[in-house]
Amino acid sequence: MYAHRFGILVVTLVLGLLFYIFKDLPSPTALTSHPAPVSTKILDRSGKLLYEIYTDQNRTPIVLEQLPSHVKRSTIAIEDKDFYRHKGFDPRGILRAFFNTFFRQELQGGSTITQQLVKNALLTPERTLRRKIREFLLTSMVEIIYPKDKILEMYLNQIPYGGTAYGIESASQVYFNKSAKDLNLAEAALLAGLPAAPTRYSPFGTHPELAKARQLEVLKQMVANRFIDQPTADSAAAAPLNYSTQSTSIRAPHFSLWVKETLAEKYGSNNVEQGGLRVTTTIDADIQQYAEKIVHDEIDKLRTSKVTNGAALVIRPTTGEILAMVGSHDFFDKEKGGNVNLAFALRQPGSAIKPINYALGLMNRRITLATPLIDAPTCFYVIGQERYCPVNYDNQFHGDTQVRFALGNSFNIPAVKMLYLNSLQEFISTASAMGLTTLKDPSNYGLSLTLGGGEVRMVDLATAFGVFANGGVRQDLVSILKVENYKGKVLQDTKFAQGPRVLPMDVSYLISHTLLDNNARSATFGPSSYLVVANHPEISVKTGTTNDKRDNWTLGYNQDILVATWVGNNDNSPMGAVASGVTGASPIWNKIISYSLAHPISGNLEGGPAPFQKERQAWPIKPESIIGKEICVLSGLLPPNPGGDDKGCQTRFEYFQTDNQPYGTESLRRQISVYKDTHEPVQPGQNPPVEQIQPEDHSTIQDPTGTIYCFDCSVPTRAINLTYPVRKSLSSPSD
């Protein structure tokens, strides 16, 4: 009785499972039909069309016999080398994919050409057990119904090659403006490498160098499978690739193609290019158009200065929304690499990275904005490296310099001293927390890192500056607000939330206040440079120029807008006379941020603060843990007679953290050791014989590295030698 009922239950479950698996199972014969695709539209934040991704429905089928052998062999070599030997499944490929995925943490597929054909033409991209079973059944049926050559022919006619190119004939026309039967080996190898990731490997995408690398991998596999010999592969690798001309019907091209690549990684290329997605992005089309024009026009003016390219990024720091992204002077200028997106390129930041270094010093209470860092000839000794003797941009030394003015004027020697005090490990840790993803191993760098000795990306540098704009909170960049299908079903809806706090608010305030202080930078930039934005004295801004003049940056912000600009050359050749703050990136930055501040942000969250901000406040927002005091302009200490008419020193006003402020009063006169012959101070790293020195009374100050600056010595300083690494117990500037 019970056995009978159990049998009925088992049969019912099996029948139900079979019905679930076989319900609406496509017929393998449907491989010869093509459902009408629906275009995907990438929109700006207010619904303006930036880019329409569509598939040409008039595909031109080819017959396998018409194709040269290298077209067929290149595809088989890279996609399924055992295609003519298996029955639809490659056990070795499946095992290899399993091993690499689970033991080497390298995600890898094991699909054969037949499986790929079934997945692309008959099934949806969902990753479920039901779909895998259906794929297995359909693959087996296709292998039974069709001969191998027909399967390969259908694959080559239906597989996506990127953009409007579905099938090898369409791809050949799109990329090389020729029929597939006329493809040479170099061209065939490039096309064969595209189906694995059409957006990523597209030579028309944001990373055209990946297309070439993929072509070389295809040629390598053709040699390994004895389809061609090595000399033939070498000849094909060296052959020129003459691409067809792209259509220009795309707005914000660098951004739009980057978003397309992002969507393809999440939803699959088929869904992006045929699935009718409606993608609302963060871009403001008006700001984008203006930024593109300014970059183009200003770079044209710099041709005589040997500057050929520029880039710009506009973000909303409170949310990380990208309002504009200009990746080059002209996206459609292929000869000069215009389609390369410099917003993601690795470039040296120059002095633009210095605020992070000083922020670390403030956070760890090693300095205040009034701490003197003596700007004098200094050489640093790092174990295993050559002696490092930095110089300033103006090739001068500025003596007694307090942190506010060292940062504002972007003096190099104080910045290197700051990193000497902080340590490379702490600096890279802080920079990484703020968003600089490319700085990792401290052993790869020296103290020149604070002058831009490492490579960063514009998108990461903008994220890091956004931390200052947000009072210490990092908001990662956002490019997409919403993704829907063409029927209105919401697939993705971005919800904004406050990011992680990576700096104390008081540290961000002190850095931002320094970077908006026009007086603090006037010694280098003058009182009326492009760093001054008309009617916006609250803008904090920092420039960066590498010593070899290969990169020139300007980044500036308030709580509403952050703009990053860069100029240089794609081939990393040096520019001519680009003066930071006067020419180069600064005029571009000034015009774009001026326009952006005057332009109400369209679309979602129009004009208002981020959802997690309670109210808009004066900028920069001063936390309760910040106090102001009158200090002496030479020492940064308190005046001896603060309440009298004669305070005992010339004073200025400065802000401090409440637990990191000067308490001692200025008393410059003290006894120091000097050289008998020159009467100059004995500095750290100098160990003269005792008979060559003597004690004398002088007016001096000493910075945290031990460097002494003498105000009344005939020769105030000679070359100072500091050995790194150093870990000292540093006290407040009053000591």
Image (cartoon, rainbow, N blue to C red):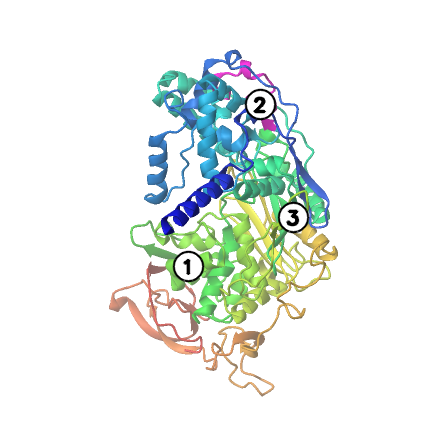
Question: Tag 3: residue type?
Answer: Lys
Disc 1/disc 3 C-alpha distance (Å): 42 Å
In this picture, is 253 found above or below 396? above
Magenta residues, dominant SS class? helix
Percent coordinates x, y for residue 611 in the rendering = 64, 64
Q: Which residue is mark 1?
A: 429
Q: Residue placed at 53% from the left, 12% from the top?
A: 66
> What's drawn in magenta, residue-wise?
165-187
Depth check: 320 or 584 in front? 320
Question: Tag 2: residue type?
Answer: Thr
Query: Earlier along the polypeptide chain: callout 1 or callout 3?
Result: 1
Question: Tag 1: residue type?
Answer: Ser
Percent coordinates x, y for residue 347 in the rendering = 50, 45
Q: Is residue 438 magenta?
A: no
Percent coordinates x, y for residue 653 in the rendering = 58, 75
Q: Secondary structure at mark 2?
A: helix
Quadrant location of residue 612?
Answer: bottom right
In this picture, is 436 found above or below 347? below
Q: Is residue 461 visible?
A: yes
Depth check: 506 or 574 in front? 506
Q: Nearer the viewer, mark 2 or mark 3?
A: 2
Q: Residue 489 has which mark?
A: 3
Q: Residue placed at 50% from the left, 69% from the top?
A: 504
For label 1, the crowd category at 10 Å Cα-Cα, with few meaning under 14, some 14 to 19 and many 20 or more, is some
Q: Residue 32 has which mark?
A: 2
Q: Secondary structure at mark 3?
A: loop
Q: Residue 397 has which mark?
A: none
| Quadrant of the frame with the C terminus | bottom left
